[in-house]
Amino acid sequence: MTLANPVVGARPVSSVRLPGLAILLVLASAVVMAVLVLLPLFVVFHDAFAKGIGKYLASIRDPDAISAIQLTLLVAAIAVPLNAAFGIAAAWCIAKFEFRGKAALLTLIDLPFSMSPVVSGLVWVLLFGAQGWFGTWLIDHDIKIIFATTGLVLATILVTFPFVARELIPLMQDQGSDEEAAALTLGAGGFTTFWRITLPNIRWALLYGVLLCNARAMGEFGAVSVVSGHIRGLTTTLPLHVEVLYNDYDFVGAFAAASLLASLGLITLVLKTGLEWRHAGELAANRRH
Amino acid sequence: MTRPPLSRRAMMAGAAATAPFLAGRAFADDKPITLLNVSYDPTRELYKEINAAFASYWKGKTGQVLDIKQSHGGSGKQARAVIDGLQADVVTLALAGDIDEIAQRAKLLPPNWQSRLPNNSTPYTSTIIFLVRKGNPKGIRDWADLVKPGVGVIVSNPKISGGARWAYLAAYAYGQKQGGAAGAKDYITRLYKNVPVLGAGARDATTTFAQRNIGDVLLSWENEAFLTIDEFGPNYDIVYPSSSILAEPPVALLDKNVDRHNTRVVATGYLNFLYSPLAQDIIGKHHYRPRDPKAVAKYAASFKQIPLATIDQAFGGWKKASATHFADGGLFDQIYKPA
């Protein structure tokens, strides 16, 4: 993964014509995609507008829905920049310097990817819950962490932790530190070097990582469900709000909220595709997504 | 580096778009008193109406503006959240055993909590009945019909759902009447063999049955069964079995929490209000069995009277019932194997 193809961006040219079997396979996957992706997407919007646009707008303007939207934006607005800052710092260390325990750090960064989101939520309950390690102290000092916004932010940060770092590390490793070294020898300070050399070099990959991080942060269900407490209008994020309304038999409301999340997904997809198309070279070191 | 850096204008636009939403949270601060009622799954509609009624009653009485928050989920799960620090002022759960857990593990209220309010702290009762598909195509009339081959029974997981515990105990009490302890064990073993999937809470089981069209019969709270017909139209029939269980969902004040939040007076007022004629009428309207004689008389016609076993007589109280049936390695774990 770290050894990038030097001619990435150029399309591999196939000299072999597609045999019949391959055409069948392509068709089959197109059908599967239509059934598994397009159909559910259609259902979301269909059911959201099932009782007309008036009902749709009314469910989005419902105070609990507005509160869920605000909370989701707030959580993402805290979690994503923190993870971006962390991702840049981690990628910088890993790509530009040699140190003991580098492999261990890389593995740690990847841990949230391999961990079930339920665990990512539960660890905070075990730490900060009333019966947890710091529970008594927090209660004595009237500090609310879980079943409050802070807990939602913590759970979201943990789940979306690797997105930015994982996007930047291969690219920065690929770029090496020659340009930074040149800047330093020409007399630039550390900060100037970072601001004028490193950051511009990684900006598109950074944006790409932030995009994915944000999509996951706003869409996360499992981890936030564990720490939410499901208080309506207070600790339900948009994905949790969808579940609440669905269980209230308010299907229009549930799918209206779901349509917001689906739209977020579609916007992310468009931006992501645009980035891949225009700046393939600067993202190419990482082709996992 | 000839490409322009990330447009500053784009960033400003993003910030401007999110600002009103974020600001709304910060400025909505005219300080009503907040009360959190952590409840079980099917009471969503009930408490929505009761909260509105209580808020206007309380405002008339004291001038204070209330903001009553609700949280709903499987009763056992909700109790767990309160134990873990969910800051409920009052809990209104499906069974006393779950509030006992809160008293025992988190010590938020005294062990004798259930004697502090009338009727064992249960402002209403309910029971477990059957909901079947229109016309009852599988001919389900009583508990014996649930264990016939080919009958799909929908019920939620008694490990986490209060209604599911009542349903399990109602079934067990039926089996016990037929053939003692051995007969009961045999009966529930065969019953849960007919359960394709255990729901996470009463509402989850209902949507499995009604929205996803799985199974032939739903073991349901009486109130939930009526609500399903209200919500989904006349696609279902209610079947009263020959006997069931007297379900007593209790309410309690969490002393440590209300003292911390300074809400003892209003929380006490809230729980007492549940016994008032006004709230009792709302309770009857939502198909829970009220305590107040006037409401009982008004809604008597909608509740069929059948013999109901009680937790104390048939099972020796919740403590014993929990240990025997629902604890890890208890009877439920012995008889239930996921399909």
Image (tube, coloured by chain):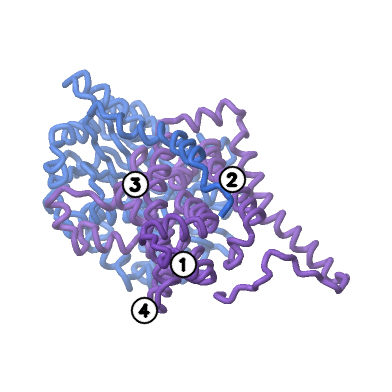
Chain colours: A purple, B blue
Q: CA distance from mark 4 to mark 3?
A: 53 Å
The residue type indicated by label 2 comes to: Ile
Q: Disc 3 sits on a residue from what chain?
A: B
Q: Nearer the viewer, mark 1 or mark 3?
A: 1
The residue type indicated by label 1 comes to: Ala
Label 4: which secondary element: loop
Q: Residues within 10 Å of mark 4 (few under 14, many from 20)?
A: few
Q: Is residue A51 visible?
A: yes
Q: CA distance from mark 2 to mark 3?
A: 37 Å
Label 2: which secondary element: helix
Q: CA distance from mark 2 to mark 4?
A: 39 Å
Residue visible at 19% across and 33% down in the picture = B272
Query: Where is the C terminus of chain A found, in terms of image quarters?
Result: bottom right
- Residue B155 point in image, percent of width and height: 46, 56
Label 3: which secondary element: loop
Reading the image, the residue beneath label 4 is A99
Reading the image, the residue beneath label 1 is A182
Reading the image, the residue beneath label 2 is A267
